[in-house]
């Protein structure tokens, strides 16, 4: 059986494909039909004609004829512009090592580059940094993500132990997974929960142990026609689950614009005299909504319902009590850091499908061979281009390729590792597969996810190229939008502001921004020299030299009201950006920072441990960490938003400041 329409019978396939040759009839039947189903899931459908085969072979059903039309195998011509391919390549470089789908993304981009005739080039991405692994993505999370991804593609019901916030112990859940969602740095799976009899949202970080298939069937469910993943684009984390009620939150004029721009999709706003507003939002998780409001300090107050006001009062009174007087454990030695227990492990990737990697390897080698009979390629470069972790894994795929690529006595392509080189030899049937294979659905999903994560703040003007490329990928991958991974971020991404920032970074141009700081009563204009745009924990930060303050600053983009590009070109300063690449969420200032010793309770330790690799573990399962800060007001808001699950041990002045702030806010709820 070959690509091109020529038909082959069952015995032809067994005889010519070495991997099948030594199998028994039963083993061949199982393996051949399993491989055929796997190809179908990749979007590559092998056709058969049982009726014609029986007439041809005297009625023996085992002589069914199979063929693979070119349009069912080859990637449709995808005419990417150089700008589009460069922008896609930038996605790969930005996400490399920080992205669960890096291996799949690299393979897919090589496929597209071969199909377009445009080689992948090095992007100018020195001034953009993305950290997607800082919020709890370790090896266990990568394994679970890969298992869920496979279950979604195969429509398999899964079982797992789940620790919900409402219960003290984990319980088994049986779920039909419909789609994955990445919101504010956290992974979720959306699907039908059998125990609840309806669609629920499960946080990946609360899944414990292994994820298992519920049955041995090839497929367990069909996604309902009325399932619309777009409804989850308007939900915030406090809205995941069954609705409990609607809250009314009074916002001060200082932050009303900020909340409306970033959270406007989650509710309605009623303007008030003086510039404030009432924010009404439905909620499922009242505790999480309370923590959000606590982080806004005196700028927000829950007016109703009474149950949430009581929840706020209890949290604030607890905060006041925990920060009154000396800390009980103050002065005791800190336990030894448990880096192995809390530091993120090296990420394990969602792996490409076996066939997708082999077919790309064939097209890649034939492309590099060009018109030569024999070519020598640097083996390390081949591994880097295709995402192999070393020569051993490349060699195994080359051996497997020889087993499965025989056609009428001749191989499609031959490759042999000789020292640090790869020798590639042309074969008579090689040109049959010179064109790249169709994108698998997994590859298409990885490409779309990368675009959705990076696109809004990529290099000047290229986010428009990525939008166009996104539509082409949807068509080339034969992927329904409903099956892509949903990325939910803050609503306040402004295209005009994004382009101004991108051009400022790319062209070393001065920016004028209107920014709301912790100390300011309203957004204030500043002139800045932009150096780095970095994303962590679902938030974007702009690292710049602020001429107004005379020093380095990390500006959270959610707090930027406006940004305008100025004509002045600046000479870059010698600024150490590696500190900000590691953790841009830390505050910045002109003087040396102060440090607060903070105890995180066991209730939040598991999540916080992934964000704080230097933290030490307490005997009770809590964490101790040193938090740098320049503004005491910033530190107070950081502690308030934990609702009592984070306590300042020292310094005494910071403890007193938290106690005073909690007392003032608690008085509003009595």
Image: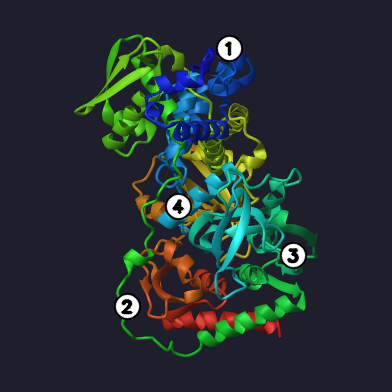
> Residue 248, labelled with which disc?
none
Disc 3 + disc 2, Cβ < 8 Å = no
Residue 293 to residue 152: above or below:
below
Sequence order check, earlier mark of 4 and 3? 4
Check the image and report above or below for 659 versus 381: below
Residue 143 is marked as: 4
Q: Are there few (<14), some (14-19), or many (20+) residues within 10 Å of tag 3?
A: few
Assess whether mark 4 and mark 1 are in contact (beta carbons under 8 angstroms). Answer: no
The CA span between labels 2 and 1 is: 79 Å
Task: For mark 1, give the secondary structure.
Answer: helix
Q: Quadrant of residue 559?
A: bottom right
Side (left or right) of 379 relative to 659: left
Looking at the rendered structure, the secondary structure element under dot 4 is: helix
- Per the image, the residue denoted by label 2 is 335
Query: Residue under circle 3?
Result: 243
Query: At which x and y percent is residue 386?
Result: 38, 32
Q: How is the image coloured?
A: rainbow
Snapshot quadrant of residue 421: top left
Residues 231 and 398: in front is 398
Q: Residue 234 at what x, y percent from top left?
A: 70, 52
State the image quarter where residue 385 is shown. top left
Q: What residue is disc 1 on?
A: 56
- Image depth: mark 2 or mark 1 in front: 1
Q: CA distance from mark 3 to mark 1?
A: 63 Å
Give the residue drawn at x 57%, y 65%: 172
């Amino acid at each position: 059986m070959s690509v091109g329409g020529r038909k082959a019978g069952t015995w032809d396939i067994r005889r010519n494909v070495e991997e099948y040759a030594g199998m028994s009839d039963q083993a061949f039947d199982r393996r051949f039909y399993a491989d055929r189903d796997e190809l179908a899931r990749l979007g590559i459908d092998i056709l058969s004609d049982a009726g014609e085969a029986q007439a041809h072979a005297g009625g023996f059903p085992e002589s069914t004829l199979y063929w693979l039309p070119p349009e069912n195998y080859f990637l449709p011509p995808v005419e990417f512009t150089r700008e589009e391919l460069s922008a896609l390549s930038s996605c790969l470089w930005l996400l490399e090592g920080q992205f669960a789908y890096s291996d799949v993304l690299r393979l897919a981009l090589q496929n597209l580059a071969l199909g377009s005739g445009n080689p992948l080039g090095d992007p100018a991405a020195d001034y953009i940094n993305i950290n997607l692994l800082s919020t709890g993505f370790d090896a266990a999370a990568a394994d679970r993500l890969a298992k869920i991804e496979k279950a979604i593609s195969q429509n398999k019901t899964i079982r797992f132990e789940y620790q919900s916030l409402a219960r003290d112990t984990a319980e088994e859940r049986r779920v039909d997974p419909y789609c994955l969602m990445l919101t504010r740095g956290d992974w979720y799976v959306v699907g039908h929960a059998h125990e609840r009899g309806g669609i629920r949202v499960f946080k990946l970080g609360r899944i414990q142990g292994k994820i298992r298939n519920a049955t041995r069937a090839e497929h367990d469910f069909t996604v309902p026609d009325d399932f619309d993943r777009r409804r989850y684009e308007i939900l915030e984390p406090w809205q995941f689950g069954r609705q409990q009620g609607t809250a009314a939150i009074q916002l001060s004029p200082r932050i009303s614009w900020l909340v409306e721009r970033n959270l406007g999709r989650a509710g309605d706003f009623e303007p008030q005299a003086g510039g404030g507003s009432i924010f009404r939002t439905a909620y499922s998780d009242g505790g999480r909504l309370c923590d959000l409001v606590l982080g806004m300090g005196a700028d927000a107050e829950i007016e109703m319902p009474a149950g949430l006001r009581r929840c706020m009062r209890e949290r604030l009174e607890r905060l006041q009590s925990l920060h009154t007087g000396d800390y009980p454990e103050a002065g005791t030695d800190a336990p030894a850091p448990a880096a192995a227990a809390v530091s993120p492990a090296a990420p394990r990737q969602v792996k490409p499908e076996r066939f997708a990697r082999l077919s790309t390897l064939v097209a890649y080698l034939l492309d590099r061979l060009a018109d030569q009979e024999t070519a020598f390629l640097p083996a390390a470069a081949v591994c880097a281009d295709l995402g192999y972790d070393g020569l051993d894994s490349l060699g195994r795929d080359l051996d497997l390729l020889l087993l499965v690529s025989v056609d009428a006595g001749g191989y499609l392509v031959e490759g042999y590792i000789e020292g640090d080189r790869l020798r590639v030899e042309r074969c008579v049937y090689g040109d049959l597969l010179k064109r790249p294979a169709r994108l698998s659905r997994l590859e298409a999903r990885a490409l779309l996810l990368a675009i959705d994560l990076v696109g809004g703040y990529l290099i000047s003007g290229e986010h428009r190229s990525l939008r166009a490329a996104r539509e082409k990928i949807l068509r080339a991958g034969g992927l329904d939008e409903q099956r892509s991974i949903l990325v939910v971020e803050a609503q306040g991404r402004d295209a005009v502001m994004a382009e101004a920032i991108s051009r400022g970074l790319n062209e070393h141009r001065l920016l004028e921004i209107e920014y709301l700081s912790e100390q300011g009563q309203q957004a204030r204009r500043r002139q800045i020299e932009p150096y780095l745009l970095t994303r962590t924990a679902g938030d974007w930060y702009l690292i710049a030299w602020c001429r107004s303050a005379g020093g380095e600053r990390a500006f959270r983009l959610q707090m930027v009201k406006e940004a305008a590009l100025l004509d002045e070109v600046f000479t870059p300063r010698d600024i150490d950006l590696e500190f900000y690449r590691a953790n841009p969420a830390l505050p910045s200032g002109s003087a040396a920072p102060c440090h607060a010793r903070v105890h995180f309770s066991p209730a939040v330790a598991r999540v916080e441990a992934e964000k704080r690799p230097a933290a030490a573990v307490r005997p009770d399962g809590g964490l101790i960490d040193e938090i740098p800060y320049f503004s005491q007001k910033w530190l107070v808001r950081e502690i308030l938003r934990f609702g009592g699950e984070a306590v300042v041990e020292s310094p005494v002045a910071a403890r007193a400041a938290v106690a005073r702030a909690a007392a003032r806010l608690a008085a509003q709820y009595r």
